[in-house]
Amino acid sequence: MRARFEAAYRDLPPEAARLLRLLGLHPAEEVEPRAAAVLADLPEDEARGLLATLAGRGLLADAGGGRFALPGPPHDHARELAERDEPGPEREAALRRVLDHCLTAGDPAAEGLALLERGRWTEAARALEDALRRAERDGDPRDVLMARLHLGRALAEAGAPERALDLLGPLPDAFAAPPDPDGYHRGLALTGLGQAYLGMRRPVTALNLFGQALEIMRAAEAVERQADLFVHLADASHLRGDTPAEGAALDRAAELYASVPSSRGRAVAGRRAAPAS
């Protein structure tokens, strides 16, 4: 999957290739032309045409209603391409533009994801509570699953592990259910559950959940997600007092972040260099 995505990316015209990698910075997997235009700092008609080009090359899916989807692993691959191929100042400017757009668009799901991207967990949880209520009111089962996933992740980060467990607990089985199993989002649900159990100081359970999620992200070739999971494994090992396992997990995370490359590696390098506590 990853090799095919890279090959298709290399064959794109330059402006379409730029939009594809910038779409990886969008916090949501679905995007409409206005958000794409803001992201790439282009006229909306031009952005719409580039989205159509990407869809025609099989790199985006038609999500209906004029929206396009870059789901799961392809979204991660695009973000990695942005880290690798987009100049840092332009990447940061695009990220600020699209996150500001999400915060002012009147869409609580987009707002919550934008806040989640910024690490503003409590604010993200409030917006995503609203998004979940809307999804439950509208009745689309897939939207409800995704809203529960995002809210559960925010709550796990915000220090509300019990509520996160309530939301995330049924999701691994729900995402694995036929006829359309979704391993990638099952992996994200397992990751969120692991973080919730860490918040409850249950590192052994967390280690098991992170291990399951890691196997899924390996199969999806989602390198940055794998690195994130090694950081979580290090957190669980630290809570257990297993310093060698913590160090080994951080070293593996650093290797994976460097291979992408990813700016997240700087935090791991700083943590590895800090005195043991």
Image (cartoon, rainbow, N blue to C red):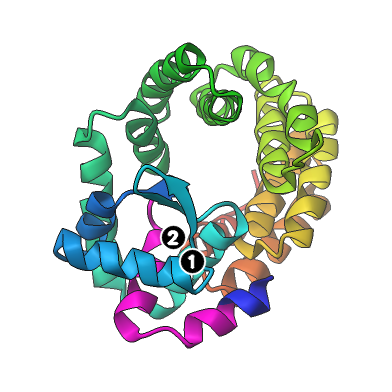
Dot 1 alpha-carbon crowd within 10 angstroms: few under 14, some 14 to 19, many 20 or more: many
Name the foreground residue: 32 vs 161.
32
Name the foreground residue: 269 vs 162.
162
Query: What residue did someone put label 2 on?
Result: 24
Q: Is 161 on the left-hand or right-hand side of 100?
A: right
Secondary structure under badge 1? helix
User: How would you classify the magenta stretch by its main secondary structure?
Assistant: helix
The amino acid type of the residue labelled 2 equals Gly
**Up-down: is 71 above or below 235?**
below
Residue stretch in magenta: 6-27
Toward which corner of the image does residue 20 lie, by quadrant? bottom left
* Marker disc for residue 212: none
Q: Is 264 on the left-hand or right-hand side of 211?
A: left
Quarter of the image for the C terminus: give it: top right
The count of marks equals 2
Q: Tell me where residue 243 appears, x and y as whole percent.
A: 78, 49
Secondary structure under badge 2? loop
Dot 2 alpha-carbon crowd within 10 angstroms: few under 14, some 14 to 19, many 20 or more: many
**Up-down: is 10 above or below 122?**
below
Q: Is residue 134 visible?
A: yes
Q: CB of mark 1 within 8 Å of CB of mark 2?
A: yes
